[in-house]
Amino acid sequence: MSVQPAPALAHPTDARLGAHHDGAGTSFALFSGVADAVELCLFDDAGGETRFELEAEEGYRWEGYLAGVGPGQRYGYRVHGPWDPAAGARCNPDKLLLDPYARAMAGEVRWDPAVYGHVAGDPDVADEADSAAFVPRSVVVGDGFDWGEDRPPRRAMADSIFYELHVKGFTQRHPGVPEELRGTYAGLAQPAVIEHLQRLGVTAVELLPVHHFIHDAALVARGLRNYWGYQSIGYFAPHGAYASAGDTGQQVDEFRAMVRALHAAGLEVVLDVVFNHTAEGDESGPTLCFRGIDNAAYYRLADDPRRYVDDTGCGNTVDLHRPPALRLVMDALRYWVQEMHVDGFRFDLAASLGRAASDFDHFSSFLEAVGQDPVLSEVKLIAEPWDVGWGGFELGEFPVGWSEWNGRYRDTARDYWRSSEGTLADFATRLSGSRDLFGDDGRRPTASVNIVTVHDGFTLADLVSYDAKHNEANGEGNRDGNDDNRSWNCGVEGPTDDPAVLELRARQTRNFLATLLLSEGPPLLLAGDELGRTQGGNNNAYCQDNEISWLDWEAAAEHAELREFTAALCRLRQRHPVFRRRQFFHGTPAPHTTRDDLDWYRPDGGLMTAEDWGAAYARAVAMALSGATGDDDGPLDDRFLIMFNAWWEPLDFTLPEGLRDSAWVVEVDTASPALTGRTVDPAASVSLASRSLLALRSPRRP
């Protein structure tokens, strides 16, 4: 095959990497610090390949401009350079490589031996088979999308209620979405879907990974798919399989149209992003992109450079202390904010992004770069604050400006409602914003994104229905997934017709939802929890692109009362700023009040003492909020008294003496949700059913 030189650039480069169409042609630019030569490969509709040799420029850039090449053109790169695994170099021009900056990608990996840069069984020996027929292509895309009057909501973190959903699974079975749009970006923008989100009262959708990803060879061999999408290979490219027109390049504008529709409905869009590792895996994995372009510039290599540091459990770790990798991630983040109008990011295994040589570094290159960036520092930044490396649990260690998934909140809430001993003090700390984790370095309650259930683990319905995981469908002998679920099946494992068990499960479900939405710190709801969604006890459905994971909207119709209960909690939270404080509680009288902004009481009405908090048997407490919102100059909110009873028997609460001066209205009753709105005699004791929560409100006098 002949290789043609690419014509010189028609105009000076603008320093952007990737492929950029100017209306007359397309410029191509790739970074590689180890290449001896780089070939740009264009493909026609029949798969025919034409190669052009790019020019080497300053800064290890390889560039070229092709007139007449425009949107829809499929392309890739071949990088000529050293194959020297012992030195960390793995260039192999027989492997077609994706453009790290491609804004669209087409096709899937077909798991032929040719996709590997090395010969089977020996990662140190280069393989000479051409991979082009078996790997995805990069796609040139155009600009010019009409955003109209798009105005990102940009809601304050304190006012946010996040809703984690899967683009495909949320609409794949939705009867209100046209069949041809189900499971797509366009499907998520349909009126029936948006109406549900608005009616529920959430403020932001947090999308599971939408960067282009691949399906692992081991899963494909078992007839399964990488459903969650945590095997990214294209950080600029929306996953093509979620587009109604497929991976034709139109997925970019379809994604934008979805964002525009969600914004018009007042909903923010947050992306779950996977910058900690790539789909290329360890030294035995495929050569698809970064490995063949400049292996050592993108990955953390072990002391033996033939191997990879694996702080992610996925075979490799992206090295964000190397300028090329850091620039790639920063450019991608800015692209999604500026060109795709997203409102923030949830960073998967974010502890690995802050690692230096080994330990987590509060002042790492990535965290410092984001903190000073005028674009990124203004959007929502949410860390999953752990990885699988040494000392990988970094909850509370991220800088000001970041929020974190609070795994401690999840564990404590689960333990409390299954009546574990010695959890009451920690439960109260989580309810009031987790000051112990976030309050010592200038951060606020908004740093704690409170979670009970997320994609990784049991759904809420399964949390109260199973003591053990049931992951047999994953084909791993039920060995995968977390064994420490802190769940309780309420007496029967799995499905049952026992009315007493079903009633208890329903009450426990409401307990978790009410706890989550009445705690300080923005809450995150898992999509479908408000509709009783079950995965049949599977707590690791990462590979289940089927009815196990897809939301069953017909079955969800049976849970209308639960949906309305959840929506009422969201409305209550949004109406009352006392649940959305920007500052931690002081524990002292708030301005214009004679009471502490937060008090804790025993069921007998007495103030909690150190001895009470330390009692292992204690399972009940009342939380009194004076109405102080943390804004010293702002108006006071209504007073609230929230009573928690995790005992297996009913319990009478006596209202504290200082709170008997006005009438109280029941806002939440997890035992009798239909009886909200009734008044309570402050002089009489209040009876709480076993394992229930009761929230009372005293309207503020004008």
Image (cartoon, rainbow, N blue to C red):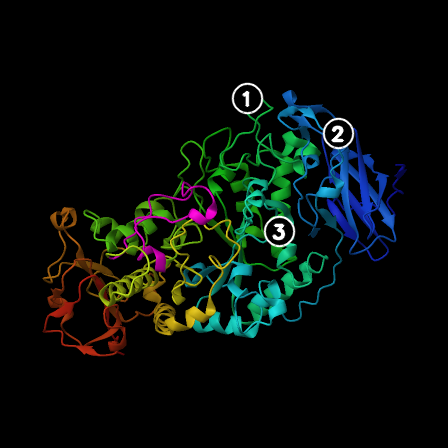
Residue located beneath label 2 in the image: 128
Q: Foreground mark, 2 or 3?
A: 2
Residue of label 3: 334
CA neighbours of label 2 inside 10 A, class few (<14), some (14 to 19), many (20+): some
Specify which label sits upstream in the sequence, 1 or 2. 2
Q: Main secondary structure of the magenta part?
A: loop
Quick check: 269 above or below 27?
Answer: below
Q: How far across and down, in percent of the image, does residue 68 sit? A: 88, 53
Q: Are marks 3 and 1 in contact (CB under 8 Å)?
A: no
Residue corresponding to mark 1: 303
Nearest to the observer: residue 340 or residue 627: 340
Q: Residue at x 45, y 33 (%)?
A: 389
Q: Where is residue 420 in the image (x, y as percent from the top left)?
A: 21, 49
Mark identifier at residue 492: none
Identify residue type, mark 2.
Glu
Which quarter of the rendered picture does the N terminus lie within? top right
Q: What is the secondary structure assignment of the residue under circle 1?
A: loop
Q: Report the label total.
A: 3
Residue type highlighted by circle 1: Asp
